[in-house]
Image: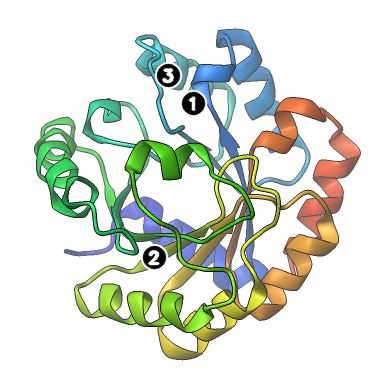
Amino acid sequence: MQIGKTEARLNAEIERRGALFAVLLDPDTSDDQALLRAGKLALENGADLLLVGGSFMGNINLPAQVAALKKEVSLPVILFPGGASQVVPGFDAILFTTLVTGRNPNYLIDEQVRGGVLVRSFGLEAIPTAYELINSGKRTAVEYISNTVPVPADKPKLSMVHSIAAELMGMRYVYLEAGSGAETPVPVEHIAYTRKSTQMKIITGGGIREPETAAVRVAAGAQIIVTGTLWEKVKDPVLLKEFAAAIHTKA
């Protein structure tokens, strides 16, 4: 599958800036105006893209919310779904994910079969993405919903071998995830091993609460840093700018 316009834009921006800052918006925890305010705050303070998604996402107003968001925000707005039922039109692209570290067939192929038809029907650009859940010190929502066991935090080579397999199956991005509200972020060793062993673009998120934590992961090889839960609690434009400065390693 050829690289689409949004993925090409992300790749070019990674080359230009070194790494990108993504803000994750969860429609289940925000009303229409709150979602819009969060998107504008991200744009104005250095974010490079918006991810929209959550483990449940029971919001029937999502297409209208995304349409309103795209009118006000010039950043790429990308769907990060937890399952096929969350695939709706209007996004610039979708992270078409496969939970490669799990052994639950529902998230290895079943949801992808159901969601793939919707992606094609809506004309969404798909970015083929390996999704890898790493133990974060507590059971997270995605672990509960997916009914899968995360990779142990002290076994970075397990992330590496799953990433190699995913790359050989044609996936171009890999999302190393500690989970929403994680106690600890993905250890840098998981990122470093995957960077040395693949050419995939590495996304990482979960438990990243300080700019310094983000910077260390960029130095290890992460190319997109995702923060989400933090901005539901701390609406500080200065901190957003500090994250952007820590992540953007090139002028």
Q: Kindly indicate the quadrant of the structure image that contains residue 221.
A: bottom right
Q: Residue at x 45, y 59 (%)?
A: 150
Q: Amino acid at mark 2?
A: Tyr
Disc 1 secondary structure class: helix
What residue is pinned by disc 2? 173
Find out whether the residues at labels 3 and 1 contact each other: C-beta distance under 8 Å: yes
Say which label, 3 or 2, has the lower sequence index: 3
Q: Amino acid at mark 1?
A: Lys
Q: SS for tag 2? A: strand
Which comes before the other along the chain, label 1 or label 2? Answer: 1
Instruction: From the viewer's side, name the closer residue of 67 and 137.
Output: 137
Using the numbered discs, state the Cα–Cα distance from disc 1 to disc 2 in whole angstroms. Answer: 24 Å
Q: Is residue 89 above or below residue 225?
A: above
Q: Which residue is mark 1?
A: 70
- The residue positioned 20% from the left and 64% from the top of the image is 2
Element class at badge 3 = helix
Whether residue 237 sits left or right of residue 250 in the image: it is right
Residue 136, quarter of the rendered image: bottom right
Left or right, 160 with respect to 49, comes to left
Residue at figure coordinates x 61%, y 18% from the top left: 36
Q: Nearer the viewer's eye, disc 3 or disc 2?
A: 2
Depth check: 193 or 203 in front?
193
Residue that label 3 marks: 67
